[in-house]
Amino acid sequence: MPRFSVIVPAYKVQAYLQESLESVLSQSYPDLELIAVDDASPDACGALIDEYAARDPRVTAVHLAHNLGAGPARNAGLARATGDYLVFLDGDDTLAPGALRAVADRLGHTGSPDVLVYDHARLLVTGDTARNPLAHLLGEDGPASFRPADRPALLRLPAAAWNKACRRDYVEREGLSFPTGLYEDLVWSSQALLAAESVAVLDRVCVYDRQRRTGSLRTTTTRRHLDVLDQYERVFGLIATRPGLERWRPAVHRRTAGHLCALYADPRRLPRAARAEFFARACALLRRHRPADPAPPPLSLSRADRIRHALMRLGLRRTYGALAALDPAGAAAARAGTALWRGLRETALRLHYRLQRLLPLRRELAVFSAYWHGGYACNPAAIEAKLRELAPRMRTAWICDPRHAATLPPRTALLRPGSAAYWSALARAGYLTTNVNFDRGLVKRRGQVLLQTQHGTPLKRVGLDLQDRPAAAPTTDFDGLLRGADQWDYLLSANRHSTLVWERAVPAAYTTLEYGYPRNDAFHRATGPDVAELRERLGIPAGSTAVLYAPTHRDYRRSRPEHLDFERVLRDLGPRFTILSRRHLTYADTGAGTGAGPVGEPVRHPRLIDVSAHPSVEELCLASDALVTDYSSLMFDYAALDRPIVIHADDWEAYEAARGTYFDLRSCPPGAIARTEDELVDIFATGHWQGSRSAQLRAAFRARFCQFDDGHAAERVVRRVFLGEPSPVPPVVPLVDRRPAPAPSSRTPEPALAPLTTRGLWP
């Protein structure tokens, strides 16, 4: 008897069915049976199902003689299910990697409840994903399992079959089944939740619900949408026949009213000729099943929604239509008012900035920013700290969004972007420092000094070298780029390679300072106890080998790529290894955590630590034993630590073709190279990551790209730019005399074994 029976109905989904079936059969939890039901589909769905059944004994193929709909197709699968728990998946949707493992673990922790409700994400047509906005209702705080009455808010979640795992003996005892017609999930979901003795939740995306442009219920205009009224009649019939469920009537009634109003408002659903009938039948249904003593509406129900529900219940269709027409007019008026206010405010701020530029400069004021109004970080932060140390008379201010205010030192003033104080500071500060660009409205005054620090050694093309790369820079304003560069007084360079690239790709009259990167000074100041304290703070187990995984973004992809199956890698590497996973800044708003699914849903593993939100990447480097990256400029900084680096170049050709690079990283890497996930595992499993060949490559890489990173870069910058000292003081420490922070462990490298895969280790 398998743990799970996964039932997949298929009708006209041949373009997506293979991906759907693969998502089930490739689960890391293999104790399952897959029952794929061909609902007499006229396309190749039936043939695809038979192919999978022939290849994998876990697949059972079911073919219906006539098209009956998703409900009867699922019932056909139910009749053949033998698993402990039933899991439903539409033929165009997919299970997230590791979903069944997470479900099985949660079932074990919660005592095998009747129903487990888990989260989903929408897979958009663009390839992007959007997590369920009601995910907060699945918080796992409180009792492991509970009665439905203890969490009535679960009724607000999508009434779908695919976001629940139901115990099979519970389903059989209650006689649960799917009705015919559209919206059959309504009845199943309501029955499963309301009749359950025990329910548990899993706060993890387990299903990706595909949003299709055509062919789906959401985008089809048909009278069959009136089926929803019959399905709600069945739900209320269930409540009427079971006295114990009567307490649910107010909540179900509110949900019904909201759902029917939403369907009526969607112009893609109901044909014009059916709208009056739908409204009249909805009115009758809401009247007929209105609770005798309705509870007050929840606070989450807006006043406008309460009015709409009441108008539909009263059958006032014309009034409802008038209100719906007024909504866009009111919204348009609000937008116009907002635009007017913004215009007036912007005009006032421009005038304020012009007036401030007439006032004398404040030579003692230095303004800093990093990463497009981000927090206290990177080269500007290291320079600001050294400036306060060497020139305590100077006043410093940091431009950042208020949400990052906690990262600022106590003596550094916060400047909110776009505020009057912000424009005053830009107009009067004697010094301006950034690692990206200042506001395009900046007019640099005579006597102001602007320092551009950049934020990485360029492997990928930058500046004017992107003019023939429209895929990488489709909207780059090259004229604006050069206008901004014309305002730079100094450009900070980490190495000779960077100097040559920037002076060609962004030509202007600035002075290049080959002083190294101030942010890397921390690598030479930190001590062994500092490193140990950082590891403890991050939660790295004692004695574990911590690998920092930090990939860069892809210009040729709109969504965030997932390059590693973390669960599989950690399983193969064994308990000695911990992965610190850091998402690239470009993907900061694509979902919490880092994982193997397209929505970035966190993979829950005791040896996987998501450090994407950690404010200092330098601290992460210090705390780790090795770096795994692809084409991120972090490799050039990490090399200053003289610790192992492994390159995971699984899509080099595509990356180089889209973005362009200044050299072939594969010919001069900082360590071993993996072209596949298998090779990456082999490199660590066999010890090549810290072997003698890796050390040789790293030494050559350091000599080329870490010429000036000796722990004194910030001091050289402050003395030259802010204190006016003409020569670089202190002088650069030779590479052989540098002593970066000690590695977290002093273990002797293990002798390299014969690799399981010999391809791709060395250039």
Image: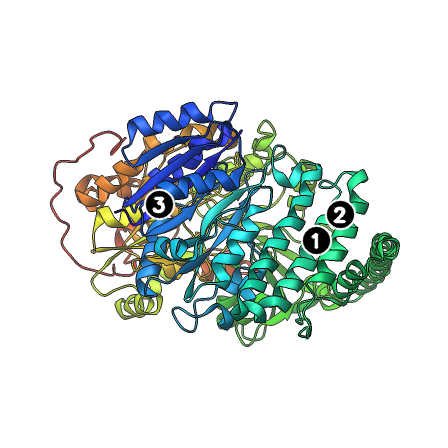
What amino acid is labelled 3 in the image?
Ser
Q: What element does badge 3 sit on?
A: strand
| Classed neighbour count for the residue bearing mark 2: other residues with Cα under 10 Å, few (<14), some (14–19), many (≥20) | many
Percent coordinates x, y for residue 275 in the rendering: 79, 44
Could you say where residue 290 lies in the image, as x and y percent from the top left? 70, 66
Q: CA distance from mark 2 to mark 1?
A: 9 Å
Residue at mark 3:
5
Q: Residue at x 37, y 38 (%)?
A: 35
Q: Quadrant of residue 483?
A: top right
Residue drawn at x 48%, y 42% is 553
Amino acid bearing label 2? Phe
Residue type at mark 1: give it: Leu
Q: Earlier in the sequence, mark 2 or mark 3?
A: 3
Coloring scheme used: rainbow
Foreground residue among 110 and 475: 110
In the displayed structure, 313 sits above or below 216; it is: below
Residue occupied by mark 1: 260
Q: Who is closer to the viewer here, 547 or 132?
A: 132
Camera-nearest residue between 641 and 632: 632
* Spatial separation of the CA atoms under disc 2 and disc 3: 37 Å
- Foreground label between 2 and 3: 2
Q: Is residue 672 visible?
A: no
From this view, report whether residue 45 is shown above or below residue 463. above
Mark 2 or mark 1: whose residue is earlier in sequence: 1
* Tags 2 and 1 touching, CB below 8 Å: yes
Marking on residue 497: none
| 163 over 363 or under it: above or below | above
Task: Give the residue pinned by disc 2.
Answer: 278
Residue 659: % across, % down = 51, 32
- Disc 3 packing (10 Å; few <14; some 14–19; many ≥20): many
Side (left or right) of 250 relative to 73: right
